[in-house]
Image (tube, grey):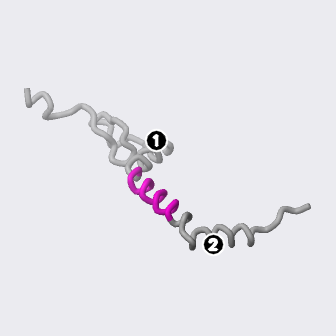
Amino acid sequence: MSTFFAHPSHMPCPECGASVACGEADVHECDPERRLDYLMFQLHDEVSRFESAYRTYLDSARGRFAQWLAERERAEPSA
């Protein structure tokens, strides 16, 4: 039974995660959108931590001041 899994016919592309036949790995071209999705999936935890830290900052006194200052310095729309 273990010899059945010894040589898989397909492997995931390390760049985009697509299932690629072992004999076609050298001619595989990654789809840019799929590659981006794959990278975002890999960074999910890091992005989540960043968003949490950013929300915490914006809730702090410094963050509220930065928001106020940015709003104040933003150019007014043309009349």
Q: Residues within 10 Å of mark 1 (few under 14, many from 20)?
A: some
Query: Is residue 45 one of those drawn in magenta?
Result: yes
> How would you classify the magenta stretch by its main secondary structure?
helix
Q: Quadrant of the C terminus?
A: bottom right
Residue ID for mark 2: 65
In the structure shown, which secondary structural element does the residue marked by tag 2 occupy? helix
In the structure shown, which secondary structural element does the residue marked by tag 1 occupy? helix
Residue ID for mark 1: 34
- Position of residue 48 relative to residue 20, above or below, is below
Point out the stretch of residues depicted in magenta: 44-56
Q: Position of residue 59 (x, y in %)?
A: 55, 64
Q: Would you say 55 lies left or right of 21 here?
A: right
Q: Residue at x 34, y 43 (%)?
A: 13
Q: Amino acid at mark 2?
A: Phe
Q: Amino acid at mark 1?
A: Arg
Q: From mark 1 to mark 2, how far is it between C-alphas? A: 39 Å
Q: Quadrant of the N terminus?
A: top left
Q: Which mark is residue 57?
A: none
Looking at marks 1 and 2 on the same chain, the residue that comes earlier in the sequence is marked by: 1
- Position of residue 75 relative to residue 55, above or below, is below
